[in-house]
Image (cartoon, rainbow, N blue to C red):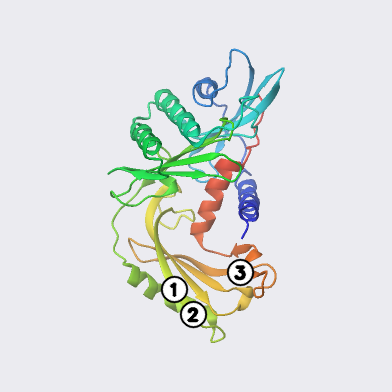
Amino acid sequence: MKKEAVLCLCLCTALILVSLARASSVVSTPSAEIKSVAAQFLAQVAGFNTSQYQEVLSTSTEPSVISPTHVETCVSATVSSEYGGADAELSFIDGNFWFYHSSSLWGNLGAGEQSFNDSLRTIATVVDGYESLFNASYCSDFAELLSTALQTQQLSVENGNFSLQVQQLQNGSLWATYYSKIDDQYTTAFRSVQIIVSARGAVTDVSDSMMIYHVATTDITVSEEQAITLAEPYIKAFAQNQQSVTAIKATFEYSPDLLNQRGDGDSYTLYPAWLVQATYDKPGEYNATSYNVFIWADNGKIASNGPVAFFGPASGTNAQANLPLLLTPAAVIVFVLTFAVYLHRKPKVRRK
């Protein structure tokens, strides 16, 4: 399955959800402090030489897309000079930095592509600037793990509290994800800092969910076997004697309560969960060849369940090229909404 096609589906889904969620009007004018912090970010973290380039900043404040009880402030920035320009977006949740994305790769004009080591050093510089600007002491281990990765040339390094994963993208960009371990062992993108630098060293993406998402409980009362047992009736009911189950697996994760089933009304709260995935021997209703059941691991309740269907024929040589459509499970909806939004969307900002 092509990554570009998956990204397109994720982005389209996210934009639809965002459009629905943003039906509310602007609730207040953001403070000048956030605007100032955004300008500092462009210079200190993103690496723009603001003494040579003109900045144009505009802002808006609205209820958060993910959890309307929180406030999201978006800052739109255009940095320009006689050599060209760059558009960037920053988002803050309740005043805490959430993400930065630049749609331009014009940085370092005239320079060739960076080596892997140079890109790691660029990310380390970004981390230093970010830690200093936001007093993000939890990033100190980030710098140490980057140093270890540079010395050992490993793409995956960790210590007792944090884990670092580095990935070289097809376009030459380097993507570093720094996870904070939950209960000293589990990692999730909802508790991470992520940085992407282009092949030429431009900082294109920075995100930090550690100040946004928090873990409600690490109490796990449902085992993997119990989760599968809870899911099996739904899996078999969907098959309706027309399909046979060929495989069932359960994956543990920490997930937000996007559908507000837990009663706290905060979709930035994480709970332990099992995602049980079943595969069938042939397509069935909705042309589905698999079925997912999402279960909260601390109380055993079913959060969501539904088939994974395919557009187009589900058999033959082109079957794997079809786009997957997850009809109901909340886990993937959460991932699509959160990361397609903060890494790839450009918020609509009312210019002031």
Location of the N terminus by quadrant is: bottom right
Location of the C terminus by quadrant is: top right
- The reply to whether callout 1 and callout 2 are in contact (CB within 8 Å) is yes
Q: In the rendered structure, which amino acid carries the disc numbered 1? A: Ile
- The reply to whether callout 1 and callout 3 are in contact (CB within 8 Å) is no
The residue to which callout 2 is attached is 245
The x, y position of residue 263, in whole percent, is 41, 54
Query: Which residue occupies the foreground of this view, 199 or 337?
Result: 199
Q: Which residue: 45% across, 30% down?
A: 121
Q: Which residue: 55% across, 52% down?
A: 336
Q: In the rendered view, would you say 121 is above or below 314?
A: above
Q: Which residue: 33% across, 46% down?
A: 181
Label 1 packing within 10 angstroms: few (<14), some (14-19), many (20+): some
Label 2 packing within 10 angstroms: few (<14), some (14-19), many (20+): some
Q: Secondary structure at mark 3?
A: strand
Which callout, 1 or 3, points to the residue nearer the camera?
1
The answer for how far apart the CA atoms under marks 1 and 3 are is 17 Å
Q: In the rendered structure, which amino acid carries the disc numbered 3? A: Ala
The residue to which callout 3 is attached is 309
First in residue order: circle 2 vs circle 3: 2
* Picture disc at residue 248: 1
Q: Secondary structure at mark 2?
A: strand
Query: Which residue occupies the foreground of this view, 289 or 26?
Result: 289
